[in-house]
Amino acid sequence: MKPILKNLSLALAALGLSACVTPSVADKSSVTLPPETAHFKPGSGSDVATTYCTICHSPDYIYMQPAQDRAGWTGAVNKMRKVFGAPIPEEQVKVIVDYLMAQNGKQ
């Protein structure tokens, strides 16, 4: 074997070996979050809102939103479904909107 090819082979072998024994730099620590303390206020549809809305939002965040009329809440729920991909079944949209109207609706 020519000296240059021998040196290249040794260098590649060493590089491959070092990749096998080099420790990972990824930190394997974890974070424990505190339990959620905010809840939706009791009412018809609160269980559905809890099931689907708290996938992404805390109840506090939803209660901080300005009061909206039915068209506004319907648009917001449909935006969550169609734009952001929230897994809210079509038949649950009215239930959630009715709940949001009862909690923070503008007539």
Image (spheres, grey):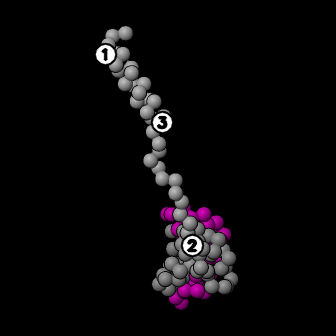
Q: Residues within 10 Å of mark 1 (few under 14, many from 20)?
A: few
Q: Nearer the viewer, residue 45 or 37?
A: 37
**How far apart are labels 1 and 2 at the CA level?**
60 Å
Please name the residue that numbered disc 3 is placed on.
Answer: 21
The numbered disc on residue 4 is: 1
User: Which residues are the magenta region?
Assistant: 80-107
Residue 94 in sight here = no
Image coordinates of residue 83 in percent, x first then y, are 49, 63
- Judged from the image, the secondary structure of the residue bearing numbered disc 2 is loop
The numbered disc on residue 52 is: none
Q: Nearer the viewer, residue 43 or 58?
A: 58
Q: Quadrant of residue 92?
A: bottom right
Circles 1 and 2, Cβ within 8 Å, touching? The answer is: no
Q: Amino acid at mark 1?
A: Ile
Please name the residue that numbered disc 2 is placed on.
Answer: 34
Which mark sits nearer the N-terminus, 1 or 3? 1
Q: Amino acid at mark 2?
A: Pro
Q: Nearer the viewer, residue 53 or 107?
A: 53
Image coordinates of residue 34 in percent, x first then y, are 57, 72
Circles 3 and 2, Cβ within 8 Å, touching? The answer is: no
- Judged from the image, the secondary structure of the residue bearing numbered disc 3 is helix
Residue 12 counted in the magenta span: no
Circles 1 and 3, Cβ within 8 Å, touching? The answer is: no
Residue 66 in sight here = yes
Q: Tell me: 5 left or right of 78.
A: left
Q: Residue at x 62, y 70 (%)?
A: 52
Which mark sits nearer the N-terminus, 1 or 2? 1
Q: How many marks?
A: 3
